Image (cartoon, coloured by chain):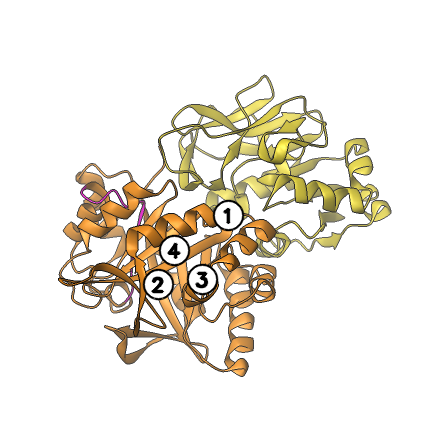
Chain colours: A orange, B yellow
Amino acid sequence: MLTKRIIPCLDIKDGRCVKGVQFENIRDAGDPVELAKWYAQKGADELVFLDITATNEGRKTFAELVRDIARHIDIPFTVGGGIGAVADVEVLLQNGADKVSINSSAIKNPQLVEELARHFGSQCVTVAIDTKYTEATGWKVYTRAGTIETEYSTIDWARKVVDLGAGEILLTSMNNDGTKAGFALDITKAVSEAVSVPVIASGGAGTMQHFADAFQVANADAALAASLFHFRELEIPDLKQYLKTQGVYVRI
Amino acid sequence: MNLVIVDYKAGNVQSVQFALERLGVQATLSADAETIKAADKVIFPGVGQAASAMAQLKARNLDKILPTLEQPFFGVCLGMQLLCQHSEEGDTDLLGIIPLPVKHFETDLKVPHMGWNQLENLQSPLFDGLQEQEYAYYVHSYYVPLSEYTIAQTSYPEPFSAALNYKNFYAAQFHPEKSGAAGSQILKNFLAL
């Protein structure tokens, strides 16, 4: 039986792991390679590293870091941040990343998704979608780290990127991110039902029950969290034991 | 041991090389026919699309060389599928070493089949030291059906070939290099063949 995946996410700036709360107030949460090894040992199913460095110099550092991570861990990992072209992806995959995640660059140039799928295969193309709900607009897609509203409804955009060749959707609810009040179950379920590829729920995890809900209520294939794991408010082995008792298939 | 990883620009060669490094084994990356022929063992990784991978092999004449090899050979993921006869992916003729088809998942479940799933019915020294229902990491949209060459199976939802063995050719649909301790054990077992 295919198991549901638990994915810690590490935001990387200048070679260090940081985490924004509601995309602001960044805090330093440690050395990425050490954290990655620790998570792999604790039973994380996969890891995500998002490079939030904006400079070219930082990009090079990140590529080196990707190589260092690949050297040390024996579970799959996805990298994202600042990817705008096929050449950017080539560097990351060559350094040992399993998948890449693209966000704003897909909004800017949807054909990039198609190009990446053609060059490297859909299985390594994750499209990250930042979504926000308002009464007036419903669930809309946001770009540039959640600062700019796009024309796309979340369901339409998810369908579009999957048609273009995305192999996975990483769906982050900006309303829920950092709140620890639970994942956005309604939009996660709607996206999961709208597309044929796996969907990662992200944003809002605070308790073990929230993860069970993401899998059992929203049909997510994976669930992602950051500070909750980094600051050890929730330990992955405990989480997986709990999920097992709730009838969720997990790798233990 | 002279271990060669076939590097034909369609594989996660770096990850495989690192996994071997963690086992204390240095492998050579090469697309050169003579280097590959002279190897004690050959590992053949692959990710991406079948037709473009075949084009890369043909460009290096490896489509002629690989089927002639007689040393222990290990195809991983797309590297396993390429050993077969024909793939529904891009209606592609493959290397034709193992007389089996590669099919697309037709299921209501999510495709790609992505994540950790269980290995069952283990029937090869490749799995020495592993328990039934051990977890392995998969990412793929195409699969090889069960056959007389199947040495392990996984279900999604129907059982398919998780691993194959035909003469000196071994192959895994999952990624041993990304499958934690179980994956390392499988690589170690291959090195001991």
| Mark 1 and mark 2 on one chain | yes
Q: Amino acid at mark 4?
A: Gln
Camera-nearest residue between B151 and A13: A13
Which residue position holds label 2?
A9
- Judging by the rendered image, the residue that carries numbered circle 4 is A41
Q: Residue type at mark 1: give it.
A: Ser
Query: Which amino acid, mark 2?
Result: Cys
Please say whether residue B1 is visible from this viewpoint.
no
Q: Say if B152 sits above or below A31 in the image.
A: above
Q: Nearer the viewer, mark 2 or mark 3?
A: 3
Chain ID at mark 1: A
**Does A218 appear in magenta?**
yes
The percent coordinates of residue B129 (x first, y second) are 49, 35
In the rendered image, residue B80, in percent from the top left (x then y), is placed at 62, 35
Per the picture, the main secondary structure of the magenta-coloured stretch is loop
Q: CA distance from mark 2 to mark 3?
A: 20 Å
Real-space CA distance between mark 2 and mark 4, rounded to the nearest whole angstrom = 15 Å
Where does the C terminus of chain B fall, quadrant-wise? top right
| Residue found at x 51% / y 39% | B174
| Element on which disc 1 rests | helix
Of the numbered discs 2 and 3, the one sitting upstream in the chain is 2
Residue B20 can be seen in this image: yes
- The numbered disc on residue A106 is 3
Q: Is residue A136 above or below residue B29?
A: below
Q: Which mark is residue A122?
A: 1
